[in-house]
Image (cartoon, rainbow, N blue to C red):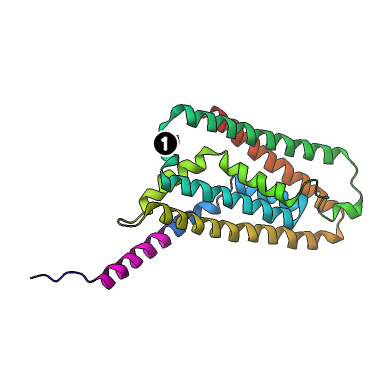
């Protein structure tokens, strides 16, 4: 007669299963995190133009938006968004327009800074912040919340890493938090690299201004292109 598995064994098996799912998801999400995209372009641009404080606020907003999408996917909201053609189209167009507008504003800043004469002391430091860190946080958060493809990513990924017998919402939040931790580590490396590079450039007053213009131009082009593609994507 086969013996039944004892409750401690069941708990131990569940812990092993959850750990395996988290590690597997972390490997996949880690690779996707370092692939250049909208989030990376936005954080780099803010780090160069506004400094570390606003860059970290933007990164925190991006991670918050991803956490909301992860919770929505685990709860089935994103699956409903995927099934509803009208809802997805509205989100897609709104998100695309939002990204395109941000891209145009960045390209405008790059063009204006190219035409203006930047004094040497100002070129060696980030530009004065025109908005609060709270605004930077909101920009990062909205960038993710208005991008339905982030939700579709979680819809496609989370079900593959949700163990049987484990509540979907807590597990989904856990996986989204893992993704957020990886993203914050990556963003911290980028922001730290920008800060270190700025110290190296203190001897050349023109270089930081050129890098800032280049960052605005590249980030603006990326966001504008992705926004247009998202708007016209069917």
Q: Residue at x 74, y 45 (%)?
A: 214
Q: Residue at x 32, y 65 (%)?
A: 14
Q: Which residue is mark 1?
A: 80
Q: Is residue 234 visible?
A: no
Locate residue 6, reporting x and y percent. Answer: 22, 71
Q: Which residues are magenta?
A: 7-24
Look at the picture and state if 52 lies above or below 5.
above
Look at the picture and state if 9 lies above or below 108.
below
**Is residue 67 shown left or right of residue 61?**
left
Locate residue 133, reporting x and y percent. Answer: 73, 52
Residue 105 lies in what quarter of the image? top right
The rendered magenta stretch, by its main secondary structure, is classed as helix
Q: Is residue 16 magenta?
A: yes
Residue 232 lies in what quarter of the image? top right
Locate residue 116, reporting x and y percent. Answer: 88, 40
Q: Is residue 52 magenta?
A: no
- What is the quadrant of the N terminus in the image? bottom left
Q: Nearest the camera: 25 or 82?
A: 82
Q: Residue at x 14, y 71 (%)?
A: 3
């Amino acid at each position: 007669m086969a013996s039944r598995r004892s409750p401690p064994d069941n708990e131990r098996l569940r812990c092993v299963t959850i750990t395996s799912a988290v590690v597997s998801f972390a490997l996949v999400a880690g690779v996707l995190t370092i692939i250049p995209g909208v989030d990376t372009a936005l954080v780099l641009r803010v780090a160069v133009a506004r400094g570390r404080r606003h860059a970290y606020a933007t990164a925190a907003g991006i991670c918050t938006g991803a956490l909301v999408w992860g919770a929505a996917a685990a709860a089935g909201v994103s699956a409903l968004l995927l099934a509803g053609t009208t809802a997805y189209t509205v989100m897609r167009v709104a998100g695309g327009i939002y990204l395109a507008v941000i891209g145009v504003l960045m390209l405008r800043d790059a063009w204006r800074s190219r035409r203006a004469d930047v004094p040497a002391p100002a070129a060696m430091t980030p530009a004065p912040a025109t908005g609060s860190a709270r605004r930077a946080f909101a920009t990062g958060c909205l960038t993710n919340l208005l991008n339905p493809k982030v939700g579709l990513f979680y819809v496609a990924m989370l079900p593959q890493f949700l163990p049987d017998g484990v509540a979907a919402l807590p597990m989904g939040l856990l996986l989204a938090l893992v993704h957020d931790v990886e993203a914050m580590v990556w963003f911290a490396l980028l922001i730290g690299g920008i800060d270190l590079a700025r110290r190296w450039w203190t001897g050349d007053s023109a270089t930081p201004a050129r890098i800032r213009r280049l960052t605005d131009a590249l980030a603006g082009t990326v966001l504008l292109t992705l926004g247009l593609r998202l708007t016209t994507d069917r």
